[in-house]
Structures are given as C-alpha cells and as structure tokens.
Amino acid sequence: MRIAVVGSGYVGLVAGACFADLGHDVILVDNDKEKLAALKDGQVPIHEKFLPELLNRHRGQRLSFSDDLEQAVRACSAIFIAVGTPSTEQGEADLSYVESVARQITGGVEEYKVIVEKSTVPVYTSEWIRKIILRNGASPESFDVASNPEFLREGTAVTDFLFPDRIVVGCDNDRCAAVLREIYEPLTSGTYYKRADAIPQPDRASIPAPIIVTSTKSAELIKHASNAFLAMKISFINAVASMCESVGASVNQVCHGIGTDSRIGPRFLNPGIGYGGSCFPKDVMAFRAVARECGYDFRLLDEVMRINEDQRHRFLRKVRSALWTLRGKHLGVLGLAFKGGTDDIRESPAILIVQSLLQEGCKITAYDPAAMERTREVMNSGIKFVNSAYEAATAADALLILTEWEEFANLDLNRLNTELKYPIVIDGRNLYDPEVMAASGFTYYSVGRAASHPEGVPALKNGTHKA
Ligand code: NAD
C-alpha cells in the first residue's frame, strides 16, 4: 500500500516509520522545511526508543519525505492526517491545521482515496473534512473519510504502535474499511511478529493485534473518551493520595488493595504531580467542550482538571513546608519532560513547578536525560542545566524529583547524600521507599505517603524536620 502521512511530529513520524516497517511505501509530508531537511539528512528530531533504528532501516527506501502534499496524495491510496490539534483559548480543539490539510488534499484526489484522521479530533470532524473536500471540488465517490485514532504513548511510541492493545478503525462503508484492514494486516494476522527483524515484543502484548471496526463517529468518541477516562483515573488516585496524607495511610497499600480488583486494575494508579503532556490536558478540555456542544454538561471532567491543577499546588506547598522560605534557596531538579522516556515538555507539570519556584526566587539546577534542549528554548534565566543527577544535587538545599525517568529510580543514595548540602528529597513521582530513604539518611517527602526522617531527626508537626 502507498501511504501518505501528513505531519511528521510525535505521531506522524512514528506512524510513518512503523507503516514502512510493516512493508508499506510511505511518504511523510510536513510543512516545516527545517524538520524535513533534518529528517532527509538522517537526523531524528524527537527522542523515542527504536525510532532511529526504523528511520535508518527505511529512509530513502520505503520511507521518503516531502513538502508537496498534493503530489503525495496523488501517489498514495491512503492519506493519514497527523497534524496538531491544540486547544483554543476557550478549550476547544483548534482544527484549523486539519482543515488546511483537508483543503490541500483535494487537489490530489483523482482516483479513490481514503483520508484517515489520525490526529485526535472531536466527533463530527470526519463530516467536516468530507464537506471541505467536496466544497473544494472532489467528487463524492472519489474518497472516504475514516477515523483511526492513535493510542501510542510518548516514550514507548514505537512498541505501542506495533504491539497495540487494539486498533480502532472507524469507517462508514466496507470499501474504506477494507483499505484500513489491509494496512494493518501484518499486525492483525500476526505475520509481522514472526519476522526475525521485528521490533522486540514488550511485556503484555496482545498478539495478534485485535482490530475493532466501528462507525466513524464512534471511533472519534473512543479516542476522546479513552483519554478523559485515563486522566480521570490519575486525578482519582491523586485525590485518594491527598486523603492518605491527611490520615497517615500509605497510597501504595491503597493502590495495591484497589488495583488487585480485576474490574479496576493496577495500571495508571500512580499518584504524582498530575498529568501533563500534549494530549491529556487538551483532550479533556476538548471533550468537555464537545459534550457541552452536544447538550451534555460533563461536569465530572471539570473536577478531573481541578484536581490535576491542585496536585501541582499541593506539591509546591510540600516544598515550602520542607524548606520554610524559598527565596534564594538552591534546588536540584531531576526531570523536566512531562513523563519519562521522552523529550516532550508540552504542558509538563515539571516545567510548571520549576516556573513557580523560579518566581518565588529559587535557584534551580536541573537535569533531564532528554528534555534539556527543549527546555532551554522556553526557559533560560535562573536555571542551570547540568549533565547528571548528582551534579543537579551538588550543594543543593534539597532535591526535587519531577519526572519518572528510570535512571532517577536507581541513584546511588550514598553519593546523593554526599552531594546535597542538606539531605532532603522531595519526590513527586514516588520513586523510592520512604523507609529506605530514611535509613540512608534522607528526610524524604513523597505523594500520598508519610514523610520519613533519618533516625535522630525529630519531625515537626507539619511534617518538616528540625534542621
Ligand atoms: P506535533 O506537533 O508533534 O506534530 C505535528 C506536525 O504537523 C508538525 O511536524 C507540523 O510541522 C506538522 N504540520 C502542521 N500543519 C501542517 C500542514 N498543513 N501540512 C503538513 N504538516 C503540518 O503533534 P503530535 O504530538 O504528533 O500530535 C498530532 C496529533 O496526534 C494531535 O491531534 C495529538 O492530539 C494526537 N496524538 C498525539 C499523541 C502524542 O503522544 N503526542 C498520541 C496520540 C494522539
């Protein structure tokens, strides 16, 4: 199959590289000329495991790059739209990039094409795409619009794409569904997984990948509802974590107790500093707006957003209660990306916390394995970037853990203790056991668990310790 993917960002680039790995000929289209030049030159613009291998494998063979959308549409049978759908000021999805692509696609629609929404879009978007393409002169039989929402997570995007829990395909007729079934056939038949050069299988893979074929509107709703549900799960456990802190219970024990109920499940019950990234915040807001437009007042989602924001403020209060005054304090920060495994800092709670601390007069020394370059582009005063977790800790009044990178969970605690001016760790990701931290000489704060202190350091009533 010849496939065009429009938008070579986190989703488009991964989808394009994976489609090539499934045996398709792919043209990746973008209007960012610098990005295209870098891709043609062999560079990999985002940090994503296995992506460099796939790009090397297929660049110049099954995978090409272009800024000529019309030409790409002419050459391909399926056109995936994977451009951004950011929030408007009112919290709705801004669909202007999608509309602009739909308009440009029309010129290349001659023989039958399937136009596929890969971007996360509100219900009814497929109908709008269809209207725009018809309005610009394509004939009604020359194309169909399908929805194929993407569920990949940054950090594990390639394996999520190739080993999905399910593939959702929303089509309103069999002809269009047949094209999408053919594209994903190597995954749904399982032939891809038998190949010696297949990307290694992660834990918990559903093989062969299940495919769910629905109406286009249902598929559009599935994506928004999934993200809203996951965000709700995070806010729910964060609210429970706050209760645990009030009564002196352990959120780990509570999560274990509720997560072993098979109706609930253990995944996504990780309390922390709240969700962020380019998807959950905007998708929950957009889903709220869609619901309003459809006549349903989905107030549950307001509460999900409120708890999420409050979680960051609670963490900042914890920093204040650990350190008393903040002006002039030197803080080491581990993690800037919105989650581990990615360089994406869009809506990162870590960045929002660092910005608040800078405003309060703290001096920040930060380390992130992948996101420092992007952070430098948006923040350059008051923050010093260093090359290791230990350097970030050096002479700091306290160390803050803000992103759950694996390497932050395996630090040499003796070394960390030596580097810090005061052995205080405030962990927004619950990477350590409070008892182990206390035994290693740290005063340790985390989320939904009591603060722990080294022996001989008396705790104050509010959880801080006498320095
Ligand atoms: P992104 O900003 O990383 O990439 C978008 C790309 O589209 C950019 O390279 C941009 O230059 C390009 N673009 C914009 N307008 C264009 C045009 N007219 N023609 C050609 N290219 C154009 O965005 P992303 O994170 O890949 O997200 C894309 C969509 O996928 C969004 O709707 C998002 O909600 C959804 N999604 C994202 C993720 C994720 O983890 N990032 C996961 C699932 C779904």
Image (spheres, helix red, strand yellow):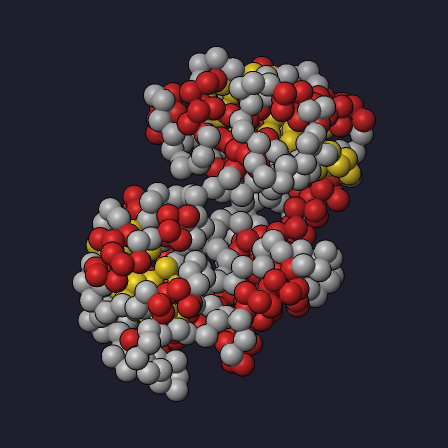
Name the foreground residue: 451 vs 341: 451
Residue 219 in view, yes or no: yes
* Residue located 27% across and 68% down the image: 423
Q: Is residue 224 above or below residue 413?
A: above
From the viewer's perspective, tell me whether residue 133 is left or right of residue 361: right
Residue 184 in view, yes or no: no
Q: Is residue 52 above or below residue 416?
A: above
Residue 428, how many percent across, how many down? 42, 63
* Residue located 37% across and 59% down the image: 401
* Residue located 32% across and 68% down the image: 442
Q: Quadrant of the C terminus?
A: bottom left
Q: Residue furthest bottom?
A: 461
Residue 351, how many percent across, how many down? 37, 57
Q: Give the mark count.
A: 0
Name the foreground residue: 152 vs 176: 152
Name the foreground residue: 12 vs 131: 12
From the viewer's perspective, tell me whether residue 455 is left or right of residue 224: left
Residue 219, how many percent across, how many down? 71, 42
Q: Is residue 133 above or below residue 293?
A: above
* Residue located 69% across and 24% down the image: 190
Residue 284, how many percent across, how many down? 59, 57
Q: Residue furthest right?
A: 174
From the viewer's perspective, tell me whether residue 147 is left or right of residue 46: right
Q: Quadrant of the N terminus?
A: top right
Please identify the quarter of the rendering in which residue 45 is found: top left
Q: Is residue 177 above or below residue 168?
A: above
